Every structure is written in structure tokens, then in C-alpha cells.
């Protein structure tokens, strides 16, 4: 699982340098979860949220998506919506944090970050859009939408959920792919951990790119 993470700007340079060389782009997976499709997903759970269906919610857990028989390719792009629900504490230390979220592909760690749902700009910093333990980013930094309702602990808070668009492109050539999304959330004294903080995803898209 340990992996030296490629700096974002370097990865972006590699990807951008390949854009003019792309020969083919094939959609190999797409799921909005509106049809309750959990094919290929382990530990999947679909729940309603804000007039749509999402994969989640998760707390100290996550899901695994297995793809087989991928076409010949050189790069993979993975994109999805990530909902951060309720009282995430970012880089806070015990007993409330840090609250970590991770994305792995084929066992390699591509995202290892923290999120803070605090409404206080100078409170509970987060790592995203950088990797943990960077702690210089304000709560909700890099978010696509911040005015979504919470699901439990922040259910009456109109800003209780934060939406992030996650997208990663990286080298990949295997005909199989294993995508894992999981968390390491800390709520030492919470009587209901999942109500305290959770996460879900939606609109997963995976493309195989040939150069």
C-alpha cells in the first residue's frame, strides 16, 4: 500500500503532454446508482441523499470496484463526485481526528487526504487538495459545492455536506483494475460514529485511454 506519491504538478505535466497524442478514449465504467446497480462492487450500499441515490454512506469502511477485460490502454481516468457529510475534523488530532479519506488503484495509494467540514475558516484545517499531513488549507478548500444539507448530525444544517469533484489520470495498462475508496475517521467519544461523520460517492466514470 505504501507508495511514493507523484507530485500533482508533475503528474499534470505528464497528462497534459499526452493530450495531443490521445488516439482513443473508451468509457469502461459509468454508474449513477439510480438503477441500484452494484455489479462488480464489494461492500456496496446505495442510499438516498438530496433527491438522488448515492453509494454510501460510509464510516470507517468503504467499497471496492473490480473491473475486468479492459481494452488495451496506456492511461486510466477515474472521476466521481465525493460527498463529505457532517462533522469531519480535518487535520485535528485525537480525540476528533485526523479524518482521512483514501483512494487506491490496484493497491497503490493515489489519494491520502483529510477533509474539514467546519464553517470556521480558521478552524480545523484540511489537507485536500494536497495529501495528508499538509495542514495549510482552509476547510472546504477545492470544493465544488458547499451548500448541501447534512445527513444526520448536521441534518438541519444547510451547509452540512460538501461536494468535491475527484478526477485522476495515471499510467495503467493491465486488463483488470481494482478501485478502492475508504476512510480512517476518528470519533473517540461519539455515541454514533456514522451519524457524526460519513461520506458517499456518485457518478463514477472510468475511461481507458490509448496513446
Image (tube, rainbow, N blue to C red):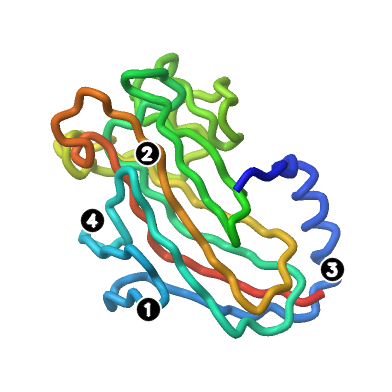
Q: Which of labels 3 and 4 is toward the front?
A: 4
Residue in the image at 27% along x and 52% along y = 57
Alpha carbon separation for disc pair 3 and 4: 39 Å
Q: Which of labels 1 and 2 is toward the front?
A: 1
The x, y position of residue 178, in whole percent, is: 54, 66
Alpha carbon separation for disc pair 2 and 3: 35 Å
- Residue neighbourhood size for the residue with mark 2, other residues' Cα within 10 Å, grouped as few (<14), some (14–19), many (≥20): some
Q: Secondary structure at mark 2?
A: strand
Residue in the image at 41% along x and 18% along y = 93
* Number of the label disc, if any, that sits on residue 49: 4
- Which image quarter: residue 120? top left
- Which image quarter: residue 194? top left
Q: Which of labels 4 and 1 is toward the front?
A: 1
In the drawing, does residue 65 fall left or right of residue 72? left
Q: In the rendered image of this protein, does residue 178 appear above or below residue 109?
A: below
Q: Nearer the viewer, residue 142 or 33?
A: 33
Q: Secondary structure at mark 4?
A: strand
Mark 2 sits on what residue? 146
Q: Secondary structure at mark 3?
A: helix
**Total marks in image:** 4
- Residue neighbourhood size for the residue with mark 3, other residues' Cα within 10 Å, grouped as few (<14), some (14–19), many (≥20): few
> Mark 2 or mark 3: which comes first in sequence?
3
> Mark 4 or mark 1: which comes first in sequence?
1
Q: Nearer the viewer, residue 52 or 112?
A: 112
Mark 3 sits on what residue? 20
Mark 1 sits on what residue? 39
- Residue neighbourhood size for the residue with mark 4, other residues' Cα within 10 Å, grouped as few (<14), some (14–19), many (≥20): some
Q: Secondary structure at mark 1?
A: loop
**Residue farthest to the front, as pictured:** 1
Q: Which of labels 3 and 1 is toward the front?
A: 1
Residue in the image at 76% along x and 42% along y = 9
Amino acid at each position: 500500500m505504501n507508495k511514493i506519491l507523484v507530485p500533482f504538478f508533475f503528474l499534470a505535466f505528464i497528462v497534459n503532454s499526452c493530450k495531443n497524442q490521445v488516439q482513443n478514449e473508451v468509457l469502461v465504467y459509468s454508474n449513477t446508482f439510480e438503477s441500484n446497480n452494484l455489479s462488480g462492487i464489494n461492500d456496496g450500499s446505495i442510499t438516498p441523499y438530496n433527491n438522488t441515490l448515492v453509494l454510501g454512506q460510509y464510516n470507517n469502511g468503504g467499497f471496492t470496484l473490480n473491473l475486468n477485460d479492459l481494452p488495451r490502454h496506456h492511461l486510466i481516468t477515474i472521476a466521481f463526485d465525493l460527498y463529505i457529510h457532517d462533522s469531519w475534523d480535518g487535520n485535528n488530532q485525537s480525540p476528533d481526528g485526523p479524518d482521512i479519506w483514501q483512494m487506491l488503484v490496484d493497491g497503490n495509494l493515489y489519494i491520502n487526504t483529510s477533509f474539514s467540514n467546519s464553517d470556521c475558516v480558521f478552524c480545523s484545517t484540511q489537507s485536500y487538495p494536497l495529501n495528508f499531513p499538509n495542514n495549510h488549507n482552509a476547510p472546504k478548500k477545492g470544493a465544488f459545492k458547499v451548500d448541501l444539507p447534512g445527513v444526520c448530525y448536521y441534518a438541519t444544517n444547510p451547509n452540512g455536506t460538501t461536494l468535491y469533484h475527484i478526477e485522476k489520470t495515471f499510467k495503467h495498462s493491465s486488463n483488470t483494475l481494482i478501485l478502492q475508496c475508504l476512510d480512517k475517521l476518528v470519533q473517540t467519544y461519539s455515541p454514533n460514529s456514522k451519524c457524526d461523520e460519513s461520506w458517499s460517492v456518485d457518478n463514477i466514470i472510468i475511461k481507458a485511454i490509448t496513446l
